[in-house]
Amino acid sequence: MSNTLKYLASLFIFGFNGIFASYVDATSAQIVFLRVLIGTAVLLGAFAVTRKPLTCLEHKRALGFLALSGCAMGLQWLLLFEAFNHIGVGMATLLNYCGPIIVIALAPFVFKERMTWNKLVGIMVVIGGVLLLNGTASGSLDVVGIACGLGAAALYAVMVTFSKKASAIKGLENTSIQMLAGLAAVFVVLLVKGEANVAMPLHSVPAMLELGILGTGAACLLYFSGIGEMKAQTVAVLGYLEPLGAVVLSALILGEAMTGVQLAGAACVIGGACLAQARIPEAVRTRVRQRFANA
């Protein structure tokens, strides 16, 4: 299987996670904990099979950043799954994918990257899309759900920021450490909420196993093995097929309906994100700068 097909397969699987979570009779925190627990077991098993030596102890600074990134990932999933309960799978996934835009907005300050006109316009379009989604709130859309979705997006930005600082640790080892840290963070939240006594009816077990084995362990293996040799631009743009797929699947399977204005907002979120991450030819950028200078 090519790297692109692996990546697309992982996005397709991720798109089903919220749908399968809706069939699990447990709290959102318990679902996330079991998901990460099972997924971590799958990844550690895969890493053991490779028989590669541990390198993380040779990069203690990177290990610290990776642990922080994993904690942010676990907390992000907690907020995302809570948002599923409040505003539905499609809407929550869309809001969660504002995360890359937050990264782009912070890049000039955190990574010293230059802000270009298409990134700035893309950020504004995404903000407009979020306002359209929020401003058409119906009975199924509430402030808590919006806050959880946007909070998940903010934690995504934190996860990426720390992950970029941990590039010395590679491949499956990197992913396994992140998952272990995420598992620890989620478990602490479970203890604080008094939900550590995890139990669920038998009819929820198949969906829970799908979430852990396929939707977390296998999907992460496909995702990280796929993006290794892909261009960053391709990864970024194709990544927005996940929220688009989640919206379509949630409408077809769960019957989640969106109004015309909400669909316009969804289009703004996805389109603005693609614009912000587009690679504009230098000739076009020069022409735009000249036009603004002569205005």
Image: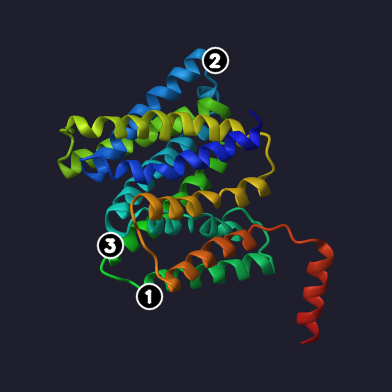
Q: Which residue is identified by label 3?
A: 144
Q: Mark 1 or 3, which is nearer the eye?
A: 1
Examine the rendered structure and indicate whether residue 259 appears above or below residue 27. Answer: below
Quarter of the image that includes the C terminus: bottom right
Find out whether the residues at labels 1 and 3 contact each other: C-beta distance under 8 Å: no
Q: How many marks?
A: 3
The crowding category of the residue bearing disc 3, from other C-alpha atoms within 10 Å (few below 14, some 14 to 19, many at least 20), is few
Sequence-wise, the earlier of marks 1 and 2 is: 2
Looking at numbered disc 1 in the image, what kind of residue is underneath it? Gly
Looking at numbered disc 3 in the image, what kind of residue is underneath it? Val
Where is residue 274? Give x, y as percent.
61, 59
**As drawn, is 53 to the left or to the right of 91?**
right
Q: Which residue is identified by label 1?
A: 135
* Gap between marks 1 and 3 measured at Cα: 14 Å
Find residue 50 and name its label.
2
- Secondary structure under badge 3? helix
Examine the rendered structure and indicate whether residue 200 appears above or below residue 119. Answer: above
**As drawn, is 91 to the left or to the right of 100?**
left
Where is residue 7? Give x, y as percent.
58, 38
Where is residue 282? Give x, y as percent.
82, 62
The residue drawn where x is 68% and y is 58% is 278
Q: In this orientation, does residue 57 appear?
A: yes
The crowding category of the residue bearing disc 1, from other C-alpha atoms within 10 Å (few below 14, some 14 to 19, many at least 20), is few
* Gap between marks 1 and 2 measured at Cα: 50 Å
The residue drawn where x is 38% and y is 34% is 181
Of the pair 59 and 261, the residue shown nearer to us: 261
